[in-house]
Amino acid sequence: MLPIDFLLAAERYLKKIKDKHLKKIYEDAIKLIRENPDAGQVKKGDLDGIYCYDVDYDNVNYEIAYTLGENQQGEVIVIIMAGSRENFYDALKKYMRGKQSYQVVHS
């Protein structure tokens, strides 16, 4: 199972979730991604190299965007962003354009 790092946007979103069932669904999805990094769909174009994993809850689609990277200990999964699917990809593209400002929050 690969370790996980969270970028600040993902960390903030996940901390704000008040619905315990939704939080558990995200936790389960992240565990699945850790076990199988290819679980998400690989994006192309502006989001080349980014994986997105769908999460459904209460008739709402949510997404987890992540990538594979390396740190001093080896390969790591970096959770870039999480949120509802509405405007998710526009926000992700905007975030990726400013990627020099990434801040990793270690798990």
Image (cartoon, rainbow, N blue to C red):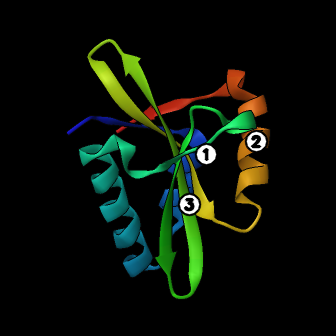
- Secondary element under disc 2, as helix, strand or loop, is helix
Task: Decide: is 94 above or below 27.
Answer: above
Asked whether disc 1 touches disc 3, contact meaning CB atoms under 8 Å apart, the reply is: no
Q: Whole-percent x and y of residue 68? A: 43, 30
Q: Residue 24: which quarter of the image?
A: bottom left
Residue underneath mark 2: 93
Q: Position of residue 91 (x, y in %)?
A: 76, 50
Residue on which disc 1 sits: 9
Question: Badge 2, how many Cα within 10 Å: few under 14, some, many 20+?
Answer: few
Q: How far apart are marks 3 and 2 (CA)?
A: 14 Å
Q: Mark 3 points at which residue?
A: 63
The amino acid sitting under disc 3 is Glu
- Secondary structure state at the residue bearing disc 3: strand
Type of the residue with mark 1: Ala
For the residues labelled 2 and 1, the Cα–Cα distance comes to 13 Å
Residue shown at 59% from the left, 80% from the top: 60
* Residue 94 appears in the picture as rendered: yes
Question: Which image quarter holds the C terminus?
Answer: top left
**Residue depicted at 78% across the width and 30% down the height:** 97
Based on the displayed image, in which of its 4 quarters is residue 1 positioned? Answer: top left
